[in-house]
Image (spheres, helix red, strand yellow):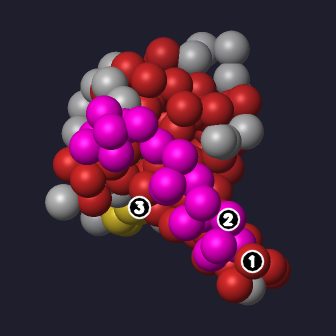
Amino acid sequence: MPSDRSALARAAALLGPLEGRIMRAVWSGAVGKTFVVRDIQQLMPELAYTTVMTTLARLAQKGLLTAKSVPKQKAHRYQAVGNPADFLARASRQDVDEIVRRYGDAALAAFAEELDRLSSERRRRLEEFVK
């Protein structure tokens, strides 16, 4: 199983540059478990408030963050949905679903061939990963 650091880097790399930078800050604990736009902007003062607000809204639409309204304010409180490993698992499932949809049984056969080629150590790690 990948280390937390490599999972963080790989997960952030799947996103756009700004989204990845923000999620890296969120997942690494640079902001609190719940946070507002200003918390991110304090970490990245070169970004306009509206840029951060729009990016957080997009991350919420993509399912990486939850957004809850703050009573009597226009602001939202955000929280990560899962960790980098959860995001990698979800993204890879979506990719596999798309590949199987496009290529059908040929894709499944290719995956099976790859499984046959795995070293015993890698096979053991994979079995631990899917438990």
Residue count near mark 2 (Cα–Cα under 10 Å), binned few <14, some 14–19, many ≥20: few
In the shown orientation, is residue 106 left or right of residue 91?
right
Q: CA distance from mark 2 to mark 1?
A: 6 Å
Q: Secondary structure at mark 1?
A: helix
Q: In the rendered structure, are the residues bearing label 2 and label 1 in contact, judged by CB atoms less than 8 Å apart? A: yes
Amino acid type, label 3: Ala
| Residue at 64% over, 32% down | 13
Amino acid type, label 2: Ala
Placement of 97 over or under 1, stated as above or below: below
- If you read the primary sequence from the N terminus, does the residue marked by circle 3 or circle 2 appear first? 3
> Quadrant of the rendered structure where residue 14 is?
top right
| Residue at 41% over, 37% down | 119
Circle on res. 67: 3
> What predominant SS class does the magenta segment belong to?
helix
Question: Is residue 117 on the magenta stretch?
Answer: yes
Q: Look at discs 1 and 3 and give the one toward the viewer.
A: 1
Q: In this view of the protein, which residue sits in the foreground, 67 or 50? A: 67
